[in-house]
Amino acid sequence: MNAPQARGGNAFIKQWNPAAWADHGRRIIPIVRAYGGIRPRAARVAEPRSLGRIGSLEVRLAANATEVRRAQRLRFHVFYEEMRAIADGPSRLARRDIDAFDAICDHLVVVDHDLIERPRFGPPRPAIVGTYRLLRQEIADRHGGFYTASEFDISGLLARHKGRRFLELGRSCVLPAYRTKRTVELLWQGIWSYVLTHRIDVMFGCASLEGTDPKALSMELSFLSHCAKAPAEWAAGPLPARHVPMDRLSKDAIDMKRTLHVLPPLIKGYLRLGAYIGNGAVVDHQFGTTDVLVVLPVEAIHPRYVEHFGGGAERQAA
């Protein structure tokens, strides 16, 4: 659900890996046209409905394919230009973060009505300053599955909770100037409204720690393993070939205060909400991160957060 802190909200789910997904990608949507000829789900949204507003910032679903492409440009800027991830060919050529899942996902965007873009063609428009990608289980099931399955074996988790509605969260990023409490709150307001509208039972995805050396991340990984490890009901681990142990230090050896300080803000946010962490991590060399699985049952969310965002999808952020 998060890459390093500088991604601002960060990448819950990151770049599609063509090598790891050679067979899976063929079952989903070909990427040979670099998304330019694919009609995304967002194109079917006739009138964007506001899901929350704080001052000049508003959160809603992307209204059309143009807005999805603008969100992809934002992701490219944050992931590849700022964070120095390694772009694949289609993303590098298009200057957009592109993968095979974009066309089947809904795209949450935060726009700033005080920051106006004036494109070469078309009317002025508020800038997109943040985005999150949402994939519901019924959509994933029709198109080959979830992105998370490229890193973690979630088959048992889904099977144990057959009948519950899962929502995968990913590709979150925010421009540096907007990495503030109100932007994060707006993103969560949008997600919560989406969860209520679609009667979601469980949110999940990949969260990231910066760096690819698990030894250097021993404190953080051990903290998550000892203090937030998922119970058997919600447990899942990496694919066997990608498994990296997390319980590298004893609980007594962990500097709790320091570890809480250095954990990425989004991971801390999920833990405050009541999320669990899976058993084992995965190193993602393309993005320079070490990923963990985050599972957040809606029933486990702390009541004060439910009260804050409201029990009904009609509530707006204030």
Image: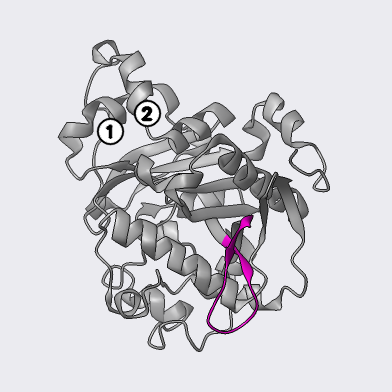
Report whether residue 185 is seen: yes
Marks 2 and 1 in Cβ contact (< 8 Å): yes
Q: Position of residue 8 (x, y in %)?
A: 44, 44
Callout 1, which amino acid? Met
Left or right: residue 305 compared with residue 105: right
Report whether residue 164 is seen: no
Callout 2, which amino acid? Leu
Name the residue carrying label 1.
246
Query: Which class describes the residues within 10 Å of circle 2: few (<14), some (14-19), or many (20+)?
Result: many
| Quarter assignment of residue 215 | top left
Give me the disc on residue 218.
none
| Quarter assignment of residue 105 | bottom right
Q: Where is residue 169 in the image (x, y as percent from the top left)?
A: 53, 53
**Who comes first in sequence, dot 2 or dot 1?**
2
Helix, strand or loop status at disc 2: helix
| Quarter assignment of residue 311 | top right
Left or right: residue 62 compared with residue 256: right
Q: Position of residue 236 (x, y in %)?
A: 42, 44
Q: How far apart are marks 2 and 1 (CA)?
A: 8 Å
Q: Is residue 5 above or below residue 154?
A: above
Q: Which residue lies furthest to the top in this view?
A: 252
Q: Is residue 193 above or below residue 182?
A: below
Judge by depth and name the residue closer to the eye, 131 or 279. Answer: 131
Query: Which class describes the residues within 10 Å of circle 1: few (<14), some (14-19), or many (20+)?
Result: many
Residue 92 on the magenta segment: no
Helix, strand or loop status at disc 1: loop
Q: Quarter of the image for the C terminus: give it.
A: top right
Residue drawn at (56%, 39%), measured in percent from left and top?
Answer: 296
Name the residue carrying label 2.
224
